[in-house]
C-alpha cells in the first residue's frame, strides 16, 4: 500500500475531488491525513461525514494564500495533494485578481512550503481549460501548471517531486454542468446549453481520483 503509515496533506480537501482522494487514501491506512481548507462549515460537514473514520484525520482551517499557514500544515508531511482553487469560470472572470491570488500565488506558496518542509511529492490538479485558455480560470490554471513544471525542472538538490494532472469535466463535481442540468429538470426549466453543436467530454469522479 502506497500511503500506509505515511503522512498526507490534502489542500482543498473538502471539495468533491478532495473528499474522493481522502476516501481512497484512508483505505491504505495512512498514519495521518490532514485536510486543509478555508471553509469552517465544509470542514464541519466533512467531519460529520467521516465521523466513524476520523481517527487519522486532522482538520486544518487555512488559506493557500497564507504561506505561513501552508508551511505549518506541511510539517512532517510525506505527500501533498493540491486540489484547492477558484474554479467557477464566471467568478474568475469577474474577480480576476482573486483568481490569480488563489490559483497562482497559492500554488507558489505550496511549492515553496513543500521544498522547505522536504515533502516527498506534490500532486497538483489542473483542468483541461488550461489548454489554449480562453478565460481567466484556464489562464490561471495554465500558469499554475507552469509553476509546478518549473519547480520540478529547477529544484536543484531538493528531493521533492512535483507533478500535475489535468481533469476534464468531472461528473457531479461542484460547478459542473450535471448538477445544473439535474436542478433544471427538477424545476421543470429548460436545459441551458452553450451551443447545440458543442461536445462535452466527461469523466467520472473515480476516474479523476485514479489519475492523481
Image (tube, grey):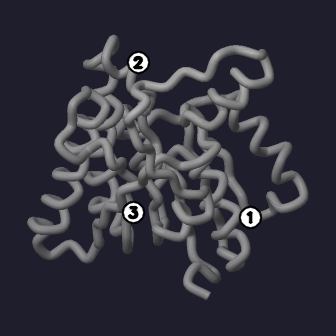
In this view, 199 is above or below 165: above
Picture quarter containing residue 47? top right
- Apparent side of residue 41 relative to residue 153 in the rendered image (left or right): right
Tell me the SS state at disc 3: strand
Instruction: Identify the residue at image location x=31%, y=42%.
Output: 129
The foreground one among 77 and 97 is 97
Single out the mark in the foreground, 3 or 2: 2
Q: CA distance from mark 2 to mark 1?
A: 35 Å
Q: x, y (%) of residue 2?
A: 55, 84
In this view, 97 is above or below 138: above
Question: What numbered label is drawn on residue 25?
Answer: none
Q: Quadrant of the N terminus?
A: bottom right
Which residue is outermost to the top?
94
Which residue is outermost to the right?
52
Tell me the SS state at disc 1: helix
Would you name the residue on which mark 2 appears?
91
Would you name the residue on which mark 1 appears?
56
Tell me the SS state at disc 2: helix
- Apparent side of residue 50 relative to residue 207 in the rendered image (left or right): right
Amino acid at each position: 500500500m502506497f500511503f500506509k503509515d505515511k503522512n498526507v496533506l490534502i489542500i482543498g480537501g473538502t471539495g468533491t475531488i478532495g473528499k474522493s482522494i481522502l476516501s481512497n487514501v484512508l483505505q491504505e491506512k495512512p498514519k495521518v491525513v490532514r485536510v486543509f481548507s478555508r471553509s469552517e462549515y465544509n470542514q464541519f460537514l466533512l467531519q460529520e461525514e467521516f465521523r466513524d473514520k476520523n481517527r487519522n484525520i486532522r482538520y486544518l482551517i487555512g488559506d493557500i494564500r497564507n504561506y505561513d499557514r501552508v508551511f505549518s500544515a506541511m510539517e512532517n508531511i510525506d505527500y501533498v495533494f493540491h486540489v484547492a482553487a477558484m474554479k467557477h469560470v464566471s467568478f474568475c472572470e469577474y474577480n480576476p485578481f482573486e483568481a490569480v491570488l488563489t490559483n497562482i500565488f497559492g500554488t507558489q506558496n505550496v511549492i515553496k512550503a513543500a521544498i522547505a518542509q522536504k515533502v516527498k511529492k506534490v500532486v497538483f490538479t489542473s483542468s483541461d481549460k488550461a489548454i489554449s485558455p480562453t478565460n481567466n480560470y484556464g489562464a490561471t490554471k495554465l500558469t499554475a501548471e507552469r509553476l509546478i513544471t518549473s519547480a520540478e525542472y529547477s529544484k536543484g538538490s531538493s528531493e521533492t517531486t512535483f507533478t500535475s494532472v489535468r481533469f476534464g469535466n468531472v461528473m457531479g463535481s461542484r460547478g459542473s454542468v450535471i448538477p445544473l442540468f439535474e436542478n433544471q429538470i427538477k424545476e421543470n426549466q429548460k436545459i441551458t446549453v452553450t451551443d447545440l453543436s458543442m461536445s462535452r467530454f466527461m469523466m467520472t469522479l473515480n476516474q479523476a481520483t485514479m489519475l492523481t
